[in-house]
Amino acid sequence: MLEDFLNNKPLFYNEIDYTRMPRVWERIKDKFRLPKIIHLIGTNGKGTTGRFLATALLRAGYSVGHYTSPHILEFNERIWLNGQSAKNALLEENHQKLLELLTQEERDSLSYFEYTTLLAMLLYSQAGVEYVVLEAGLGGEHDATAVFENELTLLTPVDYDHEAFLGTTIEEIATTKLSAVQKATIVAKQKHKEVYDIALKLSKSKDFLVYNVQKCVSSEDLQMLTQIAQEEKLPHYLYENMMLAVAALKYFKISYSAENFQNARLFGRLSKVRENIFVDVGHNKLAAEAIVKFFADKKVVLIYNSYKDKAYKEILEILQPIIKRVEVIEVDDMRIESEEKLRKVLERLEIPHKKFQFEAMREDEFYLVFGSFSVAEAFLKGLRG
């Protein structure tokens, strides 16, 4: 069973063998029939940009797969096929086929993400899709998704995150990510100018094309994007993610209309789950800045927790202007920071805080669930009862 197989693989590693995925792929790639692949790299917005693009392609008449990670509640969320999460039976069927292609050593050594990436690509290959929107994990030249030949790379906003793997400066992070580009990249609007500079520098040494998203869209496109954003009530960062998706459509000379993007946003990105409750899976400073812009006129009760390796002090400082108080939700994950350390930071910042309890939630207060996919998962499972 796929579930049992994946449960025996660790989700996270302190060290990664970057030669393993290319080695395995080289051995088995002749068993796959790859469609046109659009690769998504960057720090923030990969999931929403990918879902906007995949949905638009589907509504334009194409068969489409969208591979995204991590999931919130169900593993199937990672492997989207023509408008819905892949069915368990289809996942299991392709799991068995993949096991047959791999040696025992490969089955054992492939990481959780490497294996699920191969599983997704086998499923899409078997389904005969025309496009796959393929989202990188940590996202760079050594990412498992980078082994597949692609037609286009979309670079979403780059900022500090996963520094232990990607680098400690924007230049290092951007270089790691952009080194995954193969033929051409469309660069989203960036917070850091260095990202553009790195893209142009690498394009010369690695011989790929670089396009600025703002030069890929016309004034008519911008008018339509504004109309869609207003109708769908999208925060500004989702508007910019949608712009990047439109730029990709135009790169492939695919026409679109407003209907291509109706109800196309990915769940968990400033999603309203009740009239007074929003859930966002963001977990870094760039995501926090987007949140503050969206809730600029509100004070929210922040239902929060954080992984140890995240810059949660800085994140809380960014969020502080909109925080009424923080309620720390319990998350069963070994990577979560200790309650004592988190509480000390909250006290240092003079942010009122207490332990979160579902039964204490009030209809006359406004709640934001934020901090990671694990925080969203813990909250949503508790909300379902």
Image (tube, grey):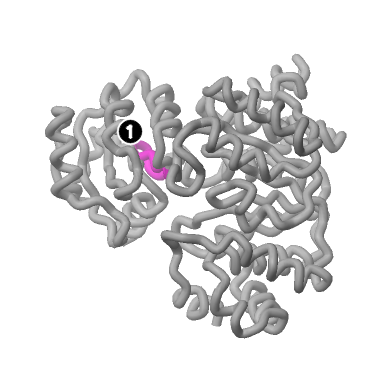
As rendered, which of 325 and 46 lies closer to the eye?
46
List x then y, in percent, for residue 17. 55, 63
Can you say which quadrant of the picture contains the N terminus?
A: bottom right
Q: Quadrant of residue 176?
A: top right
Q: Tell me what residue is drawn at x 61 percent, y 41 percent.
A: 177
* Figure quadrant of the C terminus: bottom left
Residue 321 in sight here: yes
Q: Residue at x 45, y 64 (%)?
A: 11
Please, is residue 329 above or below residue 381 in the view?
A: above
**Badge 1: residue crowd in 10 Å (few <14, some 14–19, many ≥20):** some
- Along the line of sight, the residue nearer the viewer: 101 or 4: 101
- Image coordinates for residue 151, horizontal then vertical, percent: 81, 45
Dot 1 amino acid type: Ile
Magenta stretch, residue numbers: 273-281
Name the spot of residue 23 as percent of width and height, x first. 69, 67
Identify the residue shown where x is 48% and y is 80%: 4
Residue 262 vs residue 192, the one in the foreground: 192
**Which residue, as the protein is rendered here, is positioned at the far right?**
253
Q: Is residue 335 above or below residue 159?
A: below
Q: Is residue 78 magenta?
A: no
Q: Is residue 276 magenta?
A: yes
- Residue 339: image x %, image y %? 17, 50
Where is 267 relative to 11, above or below? Answer: above
Visible residue check, residue 257: no
Residue beneath disc 1: 315
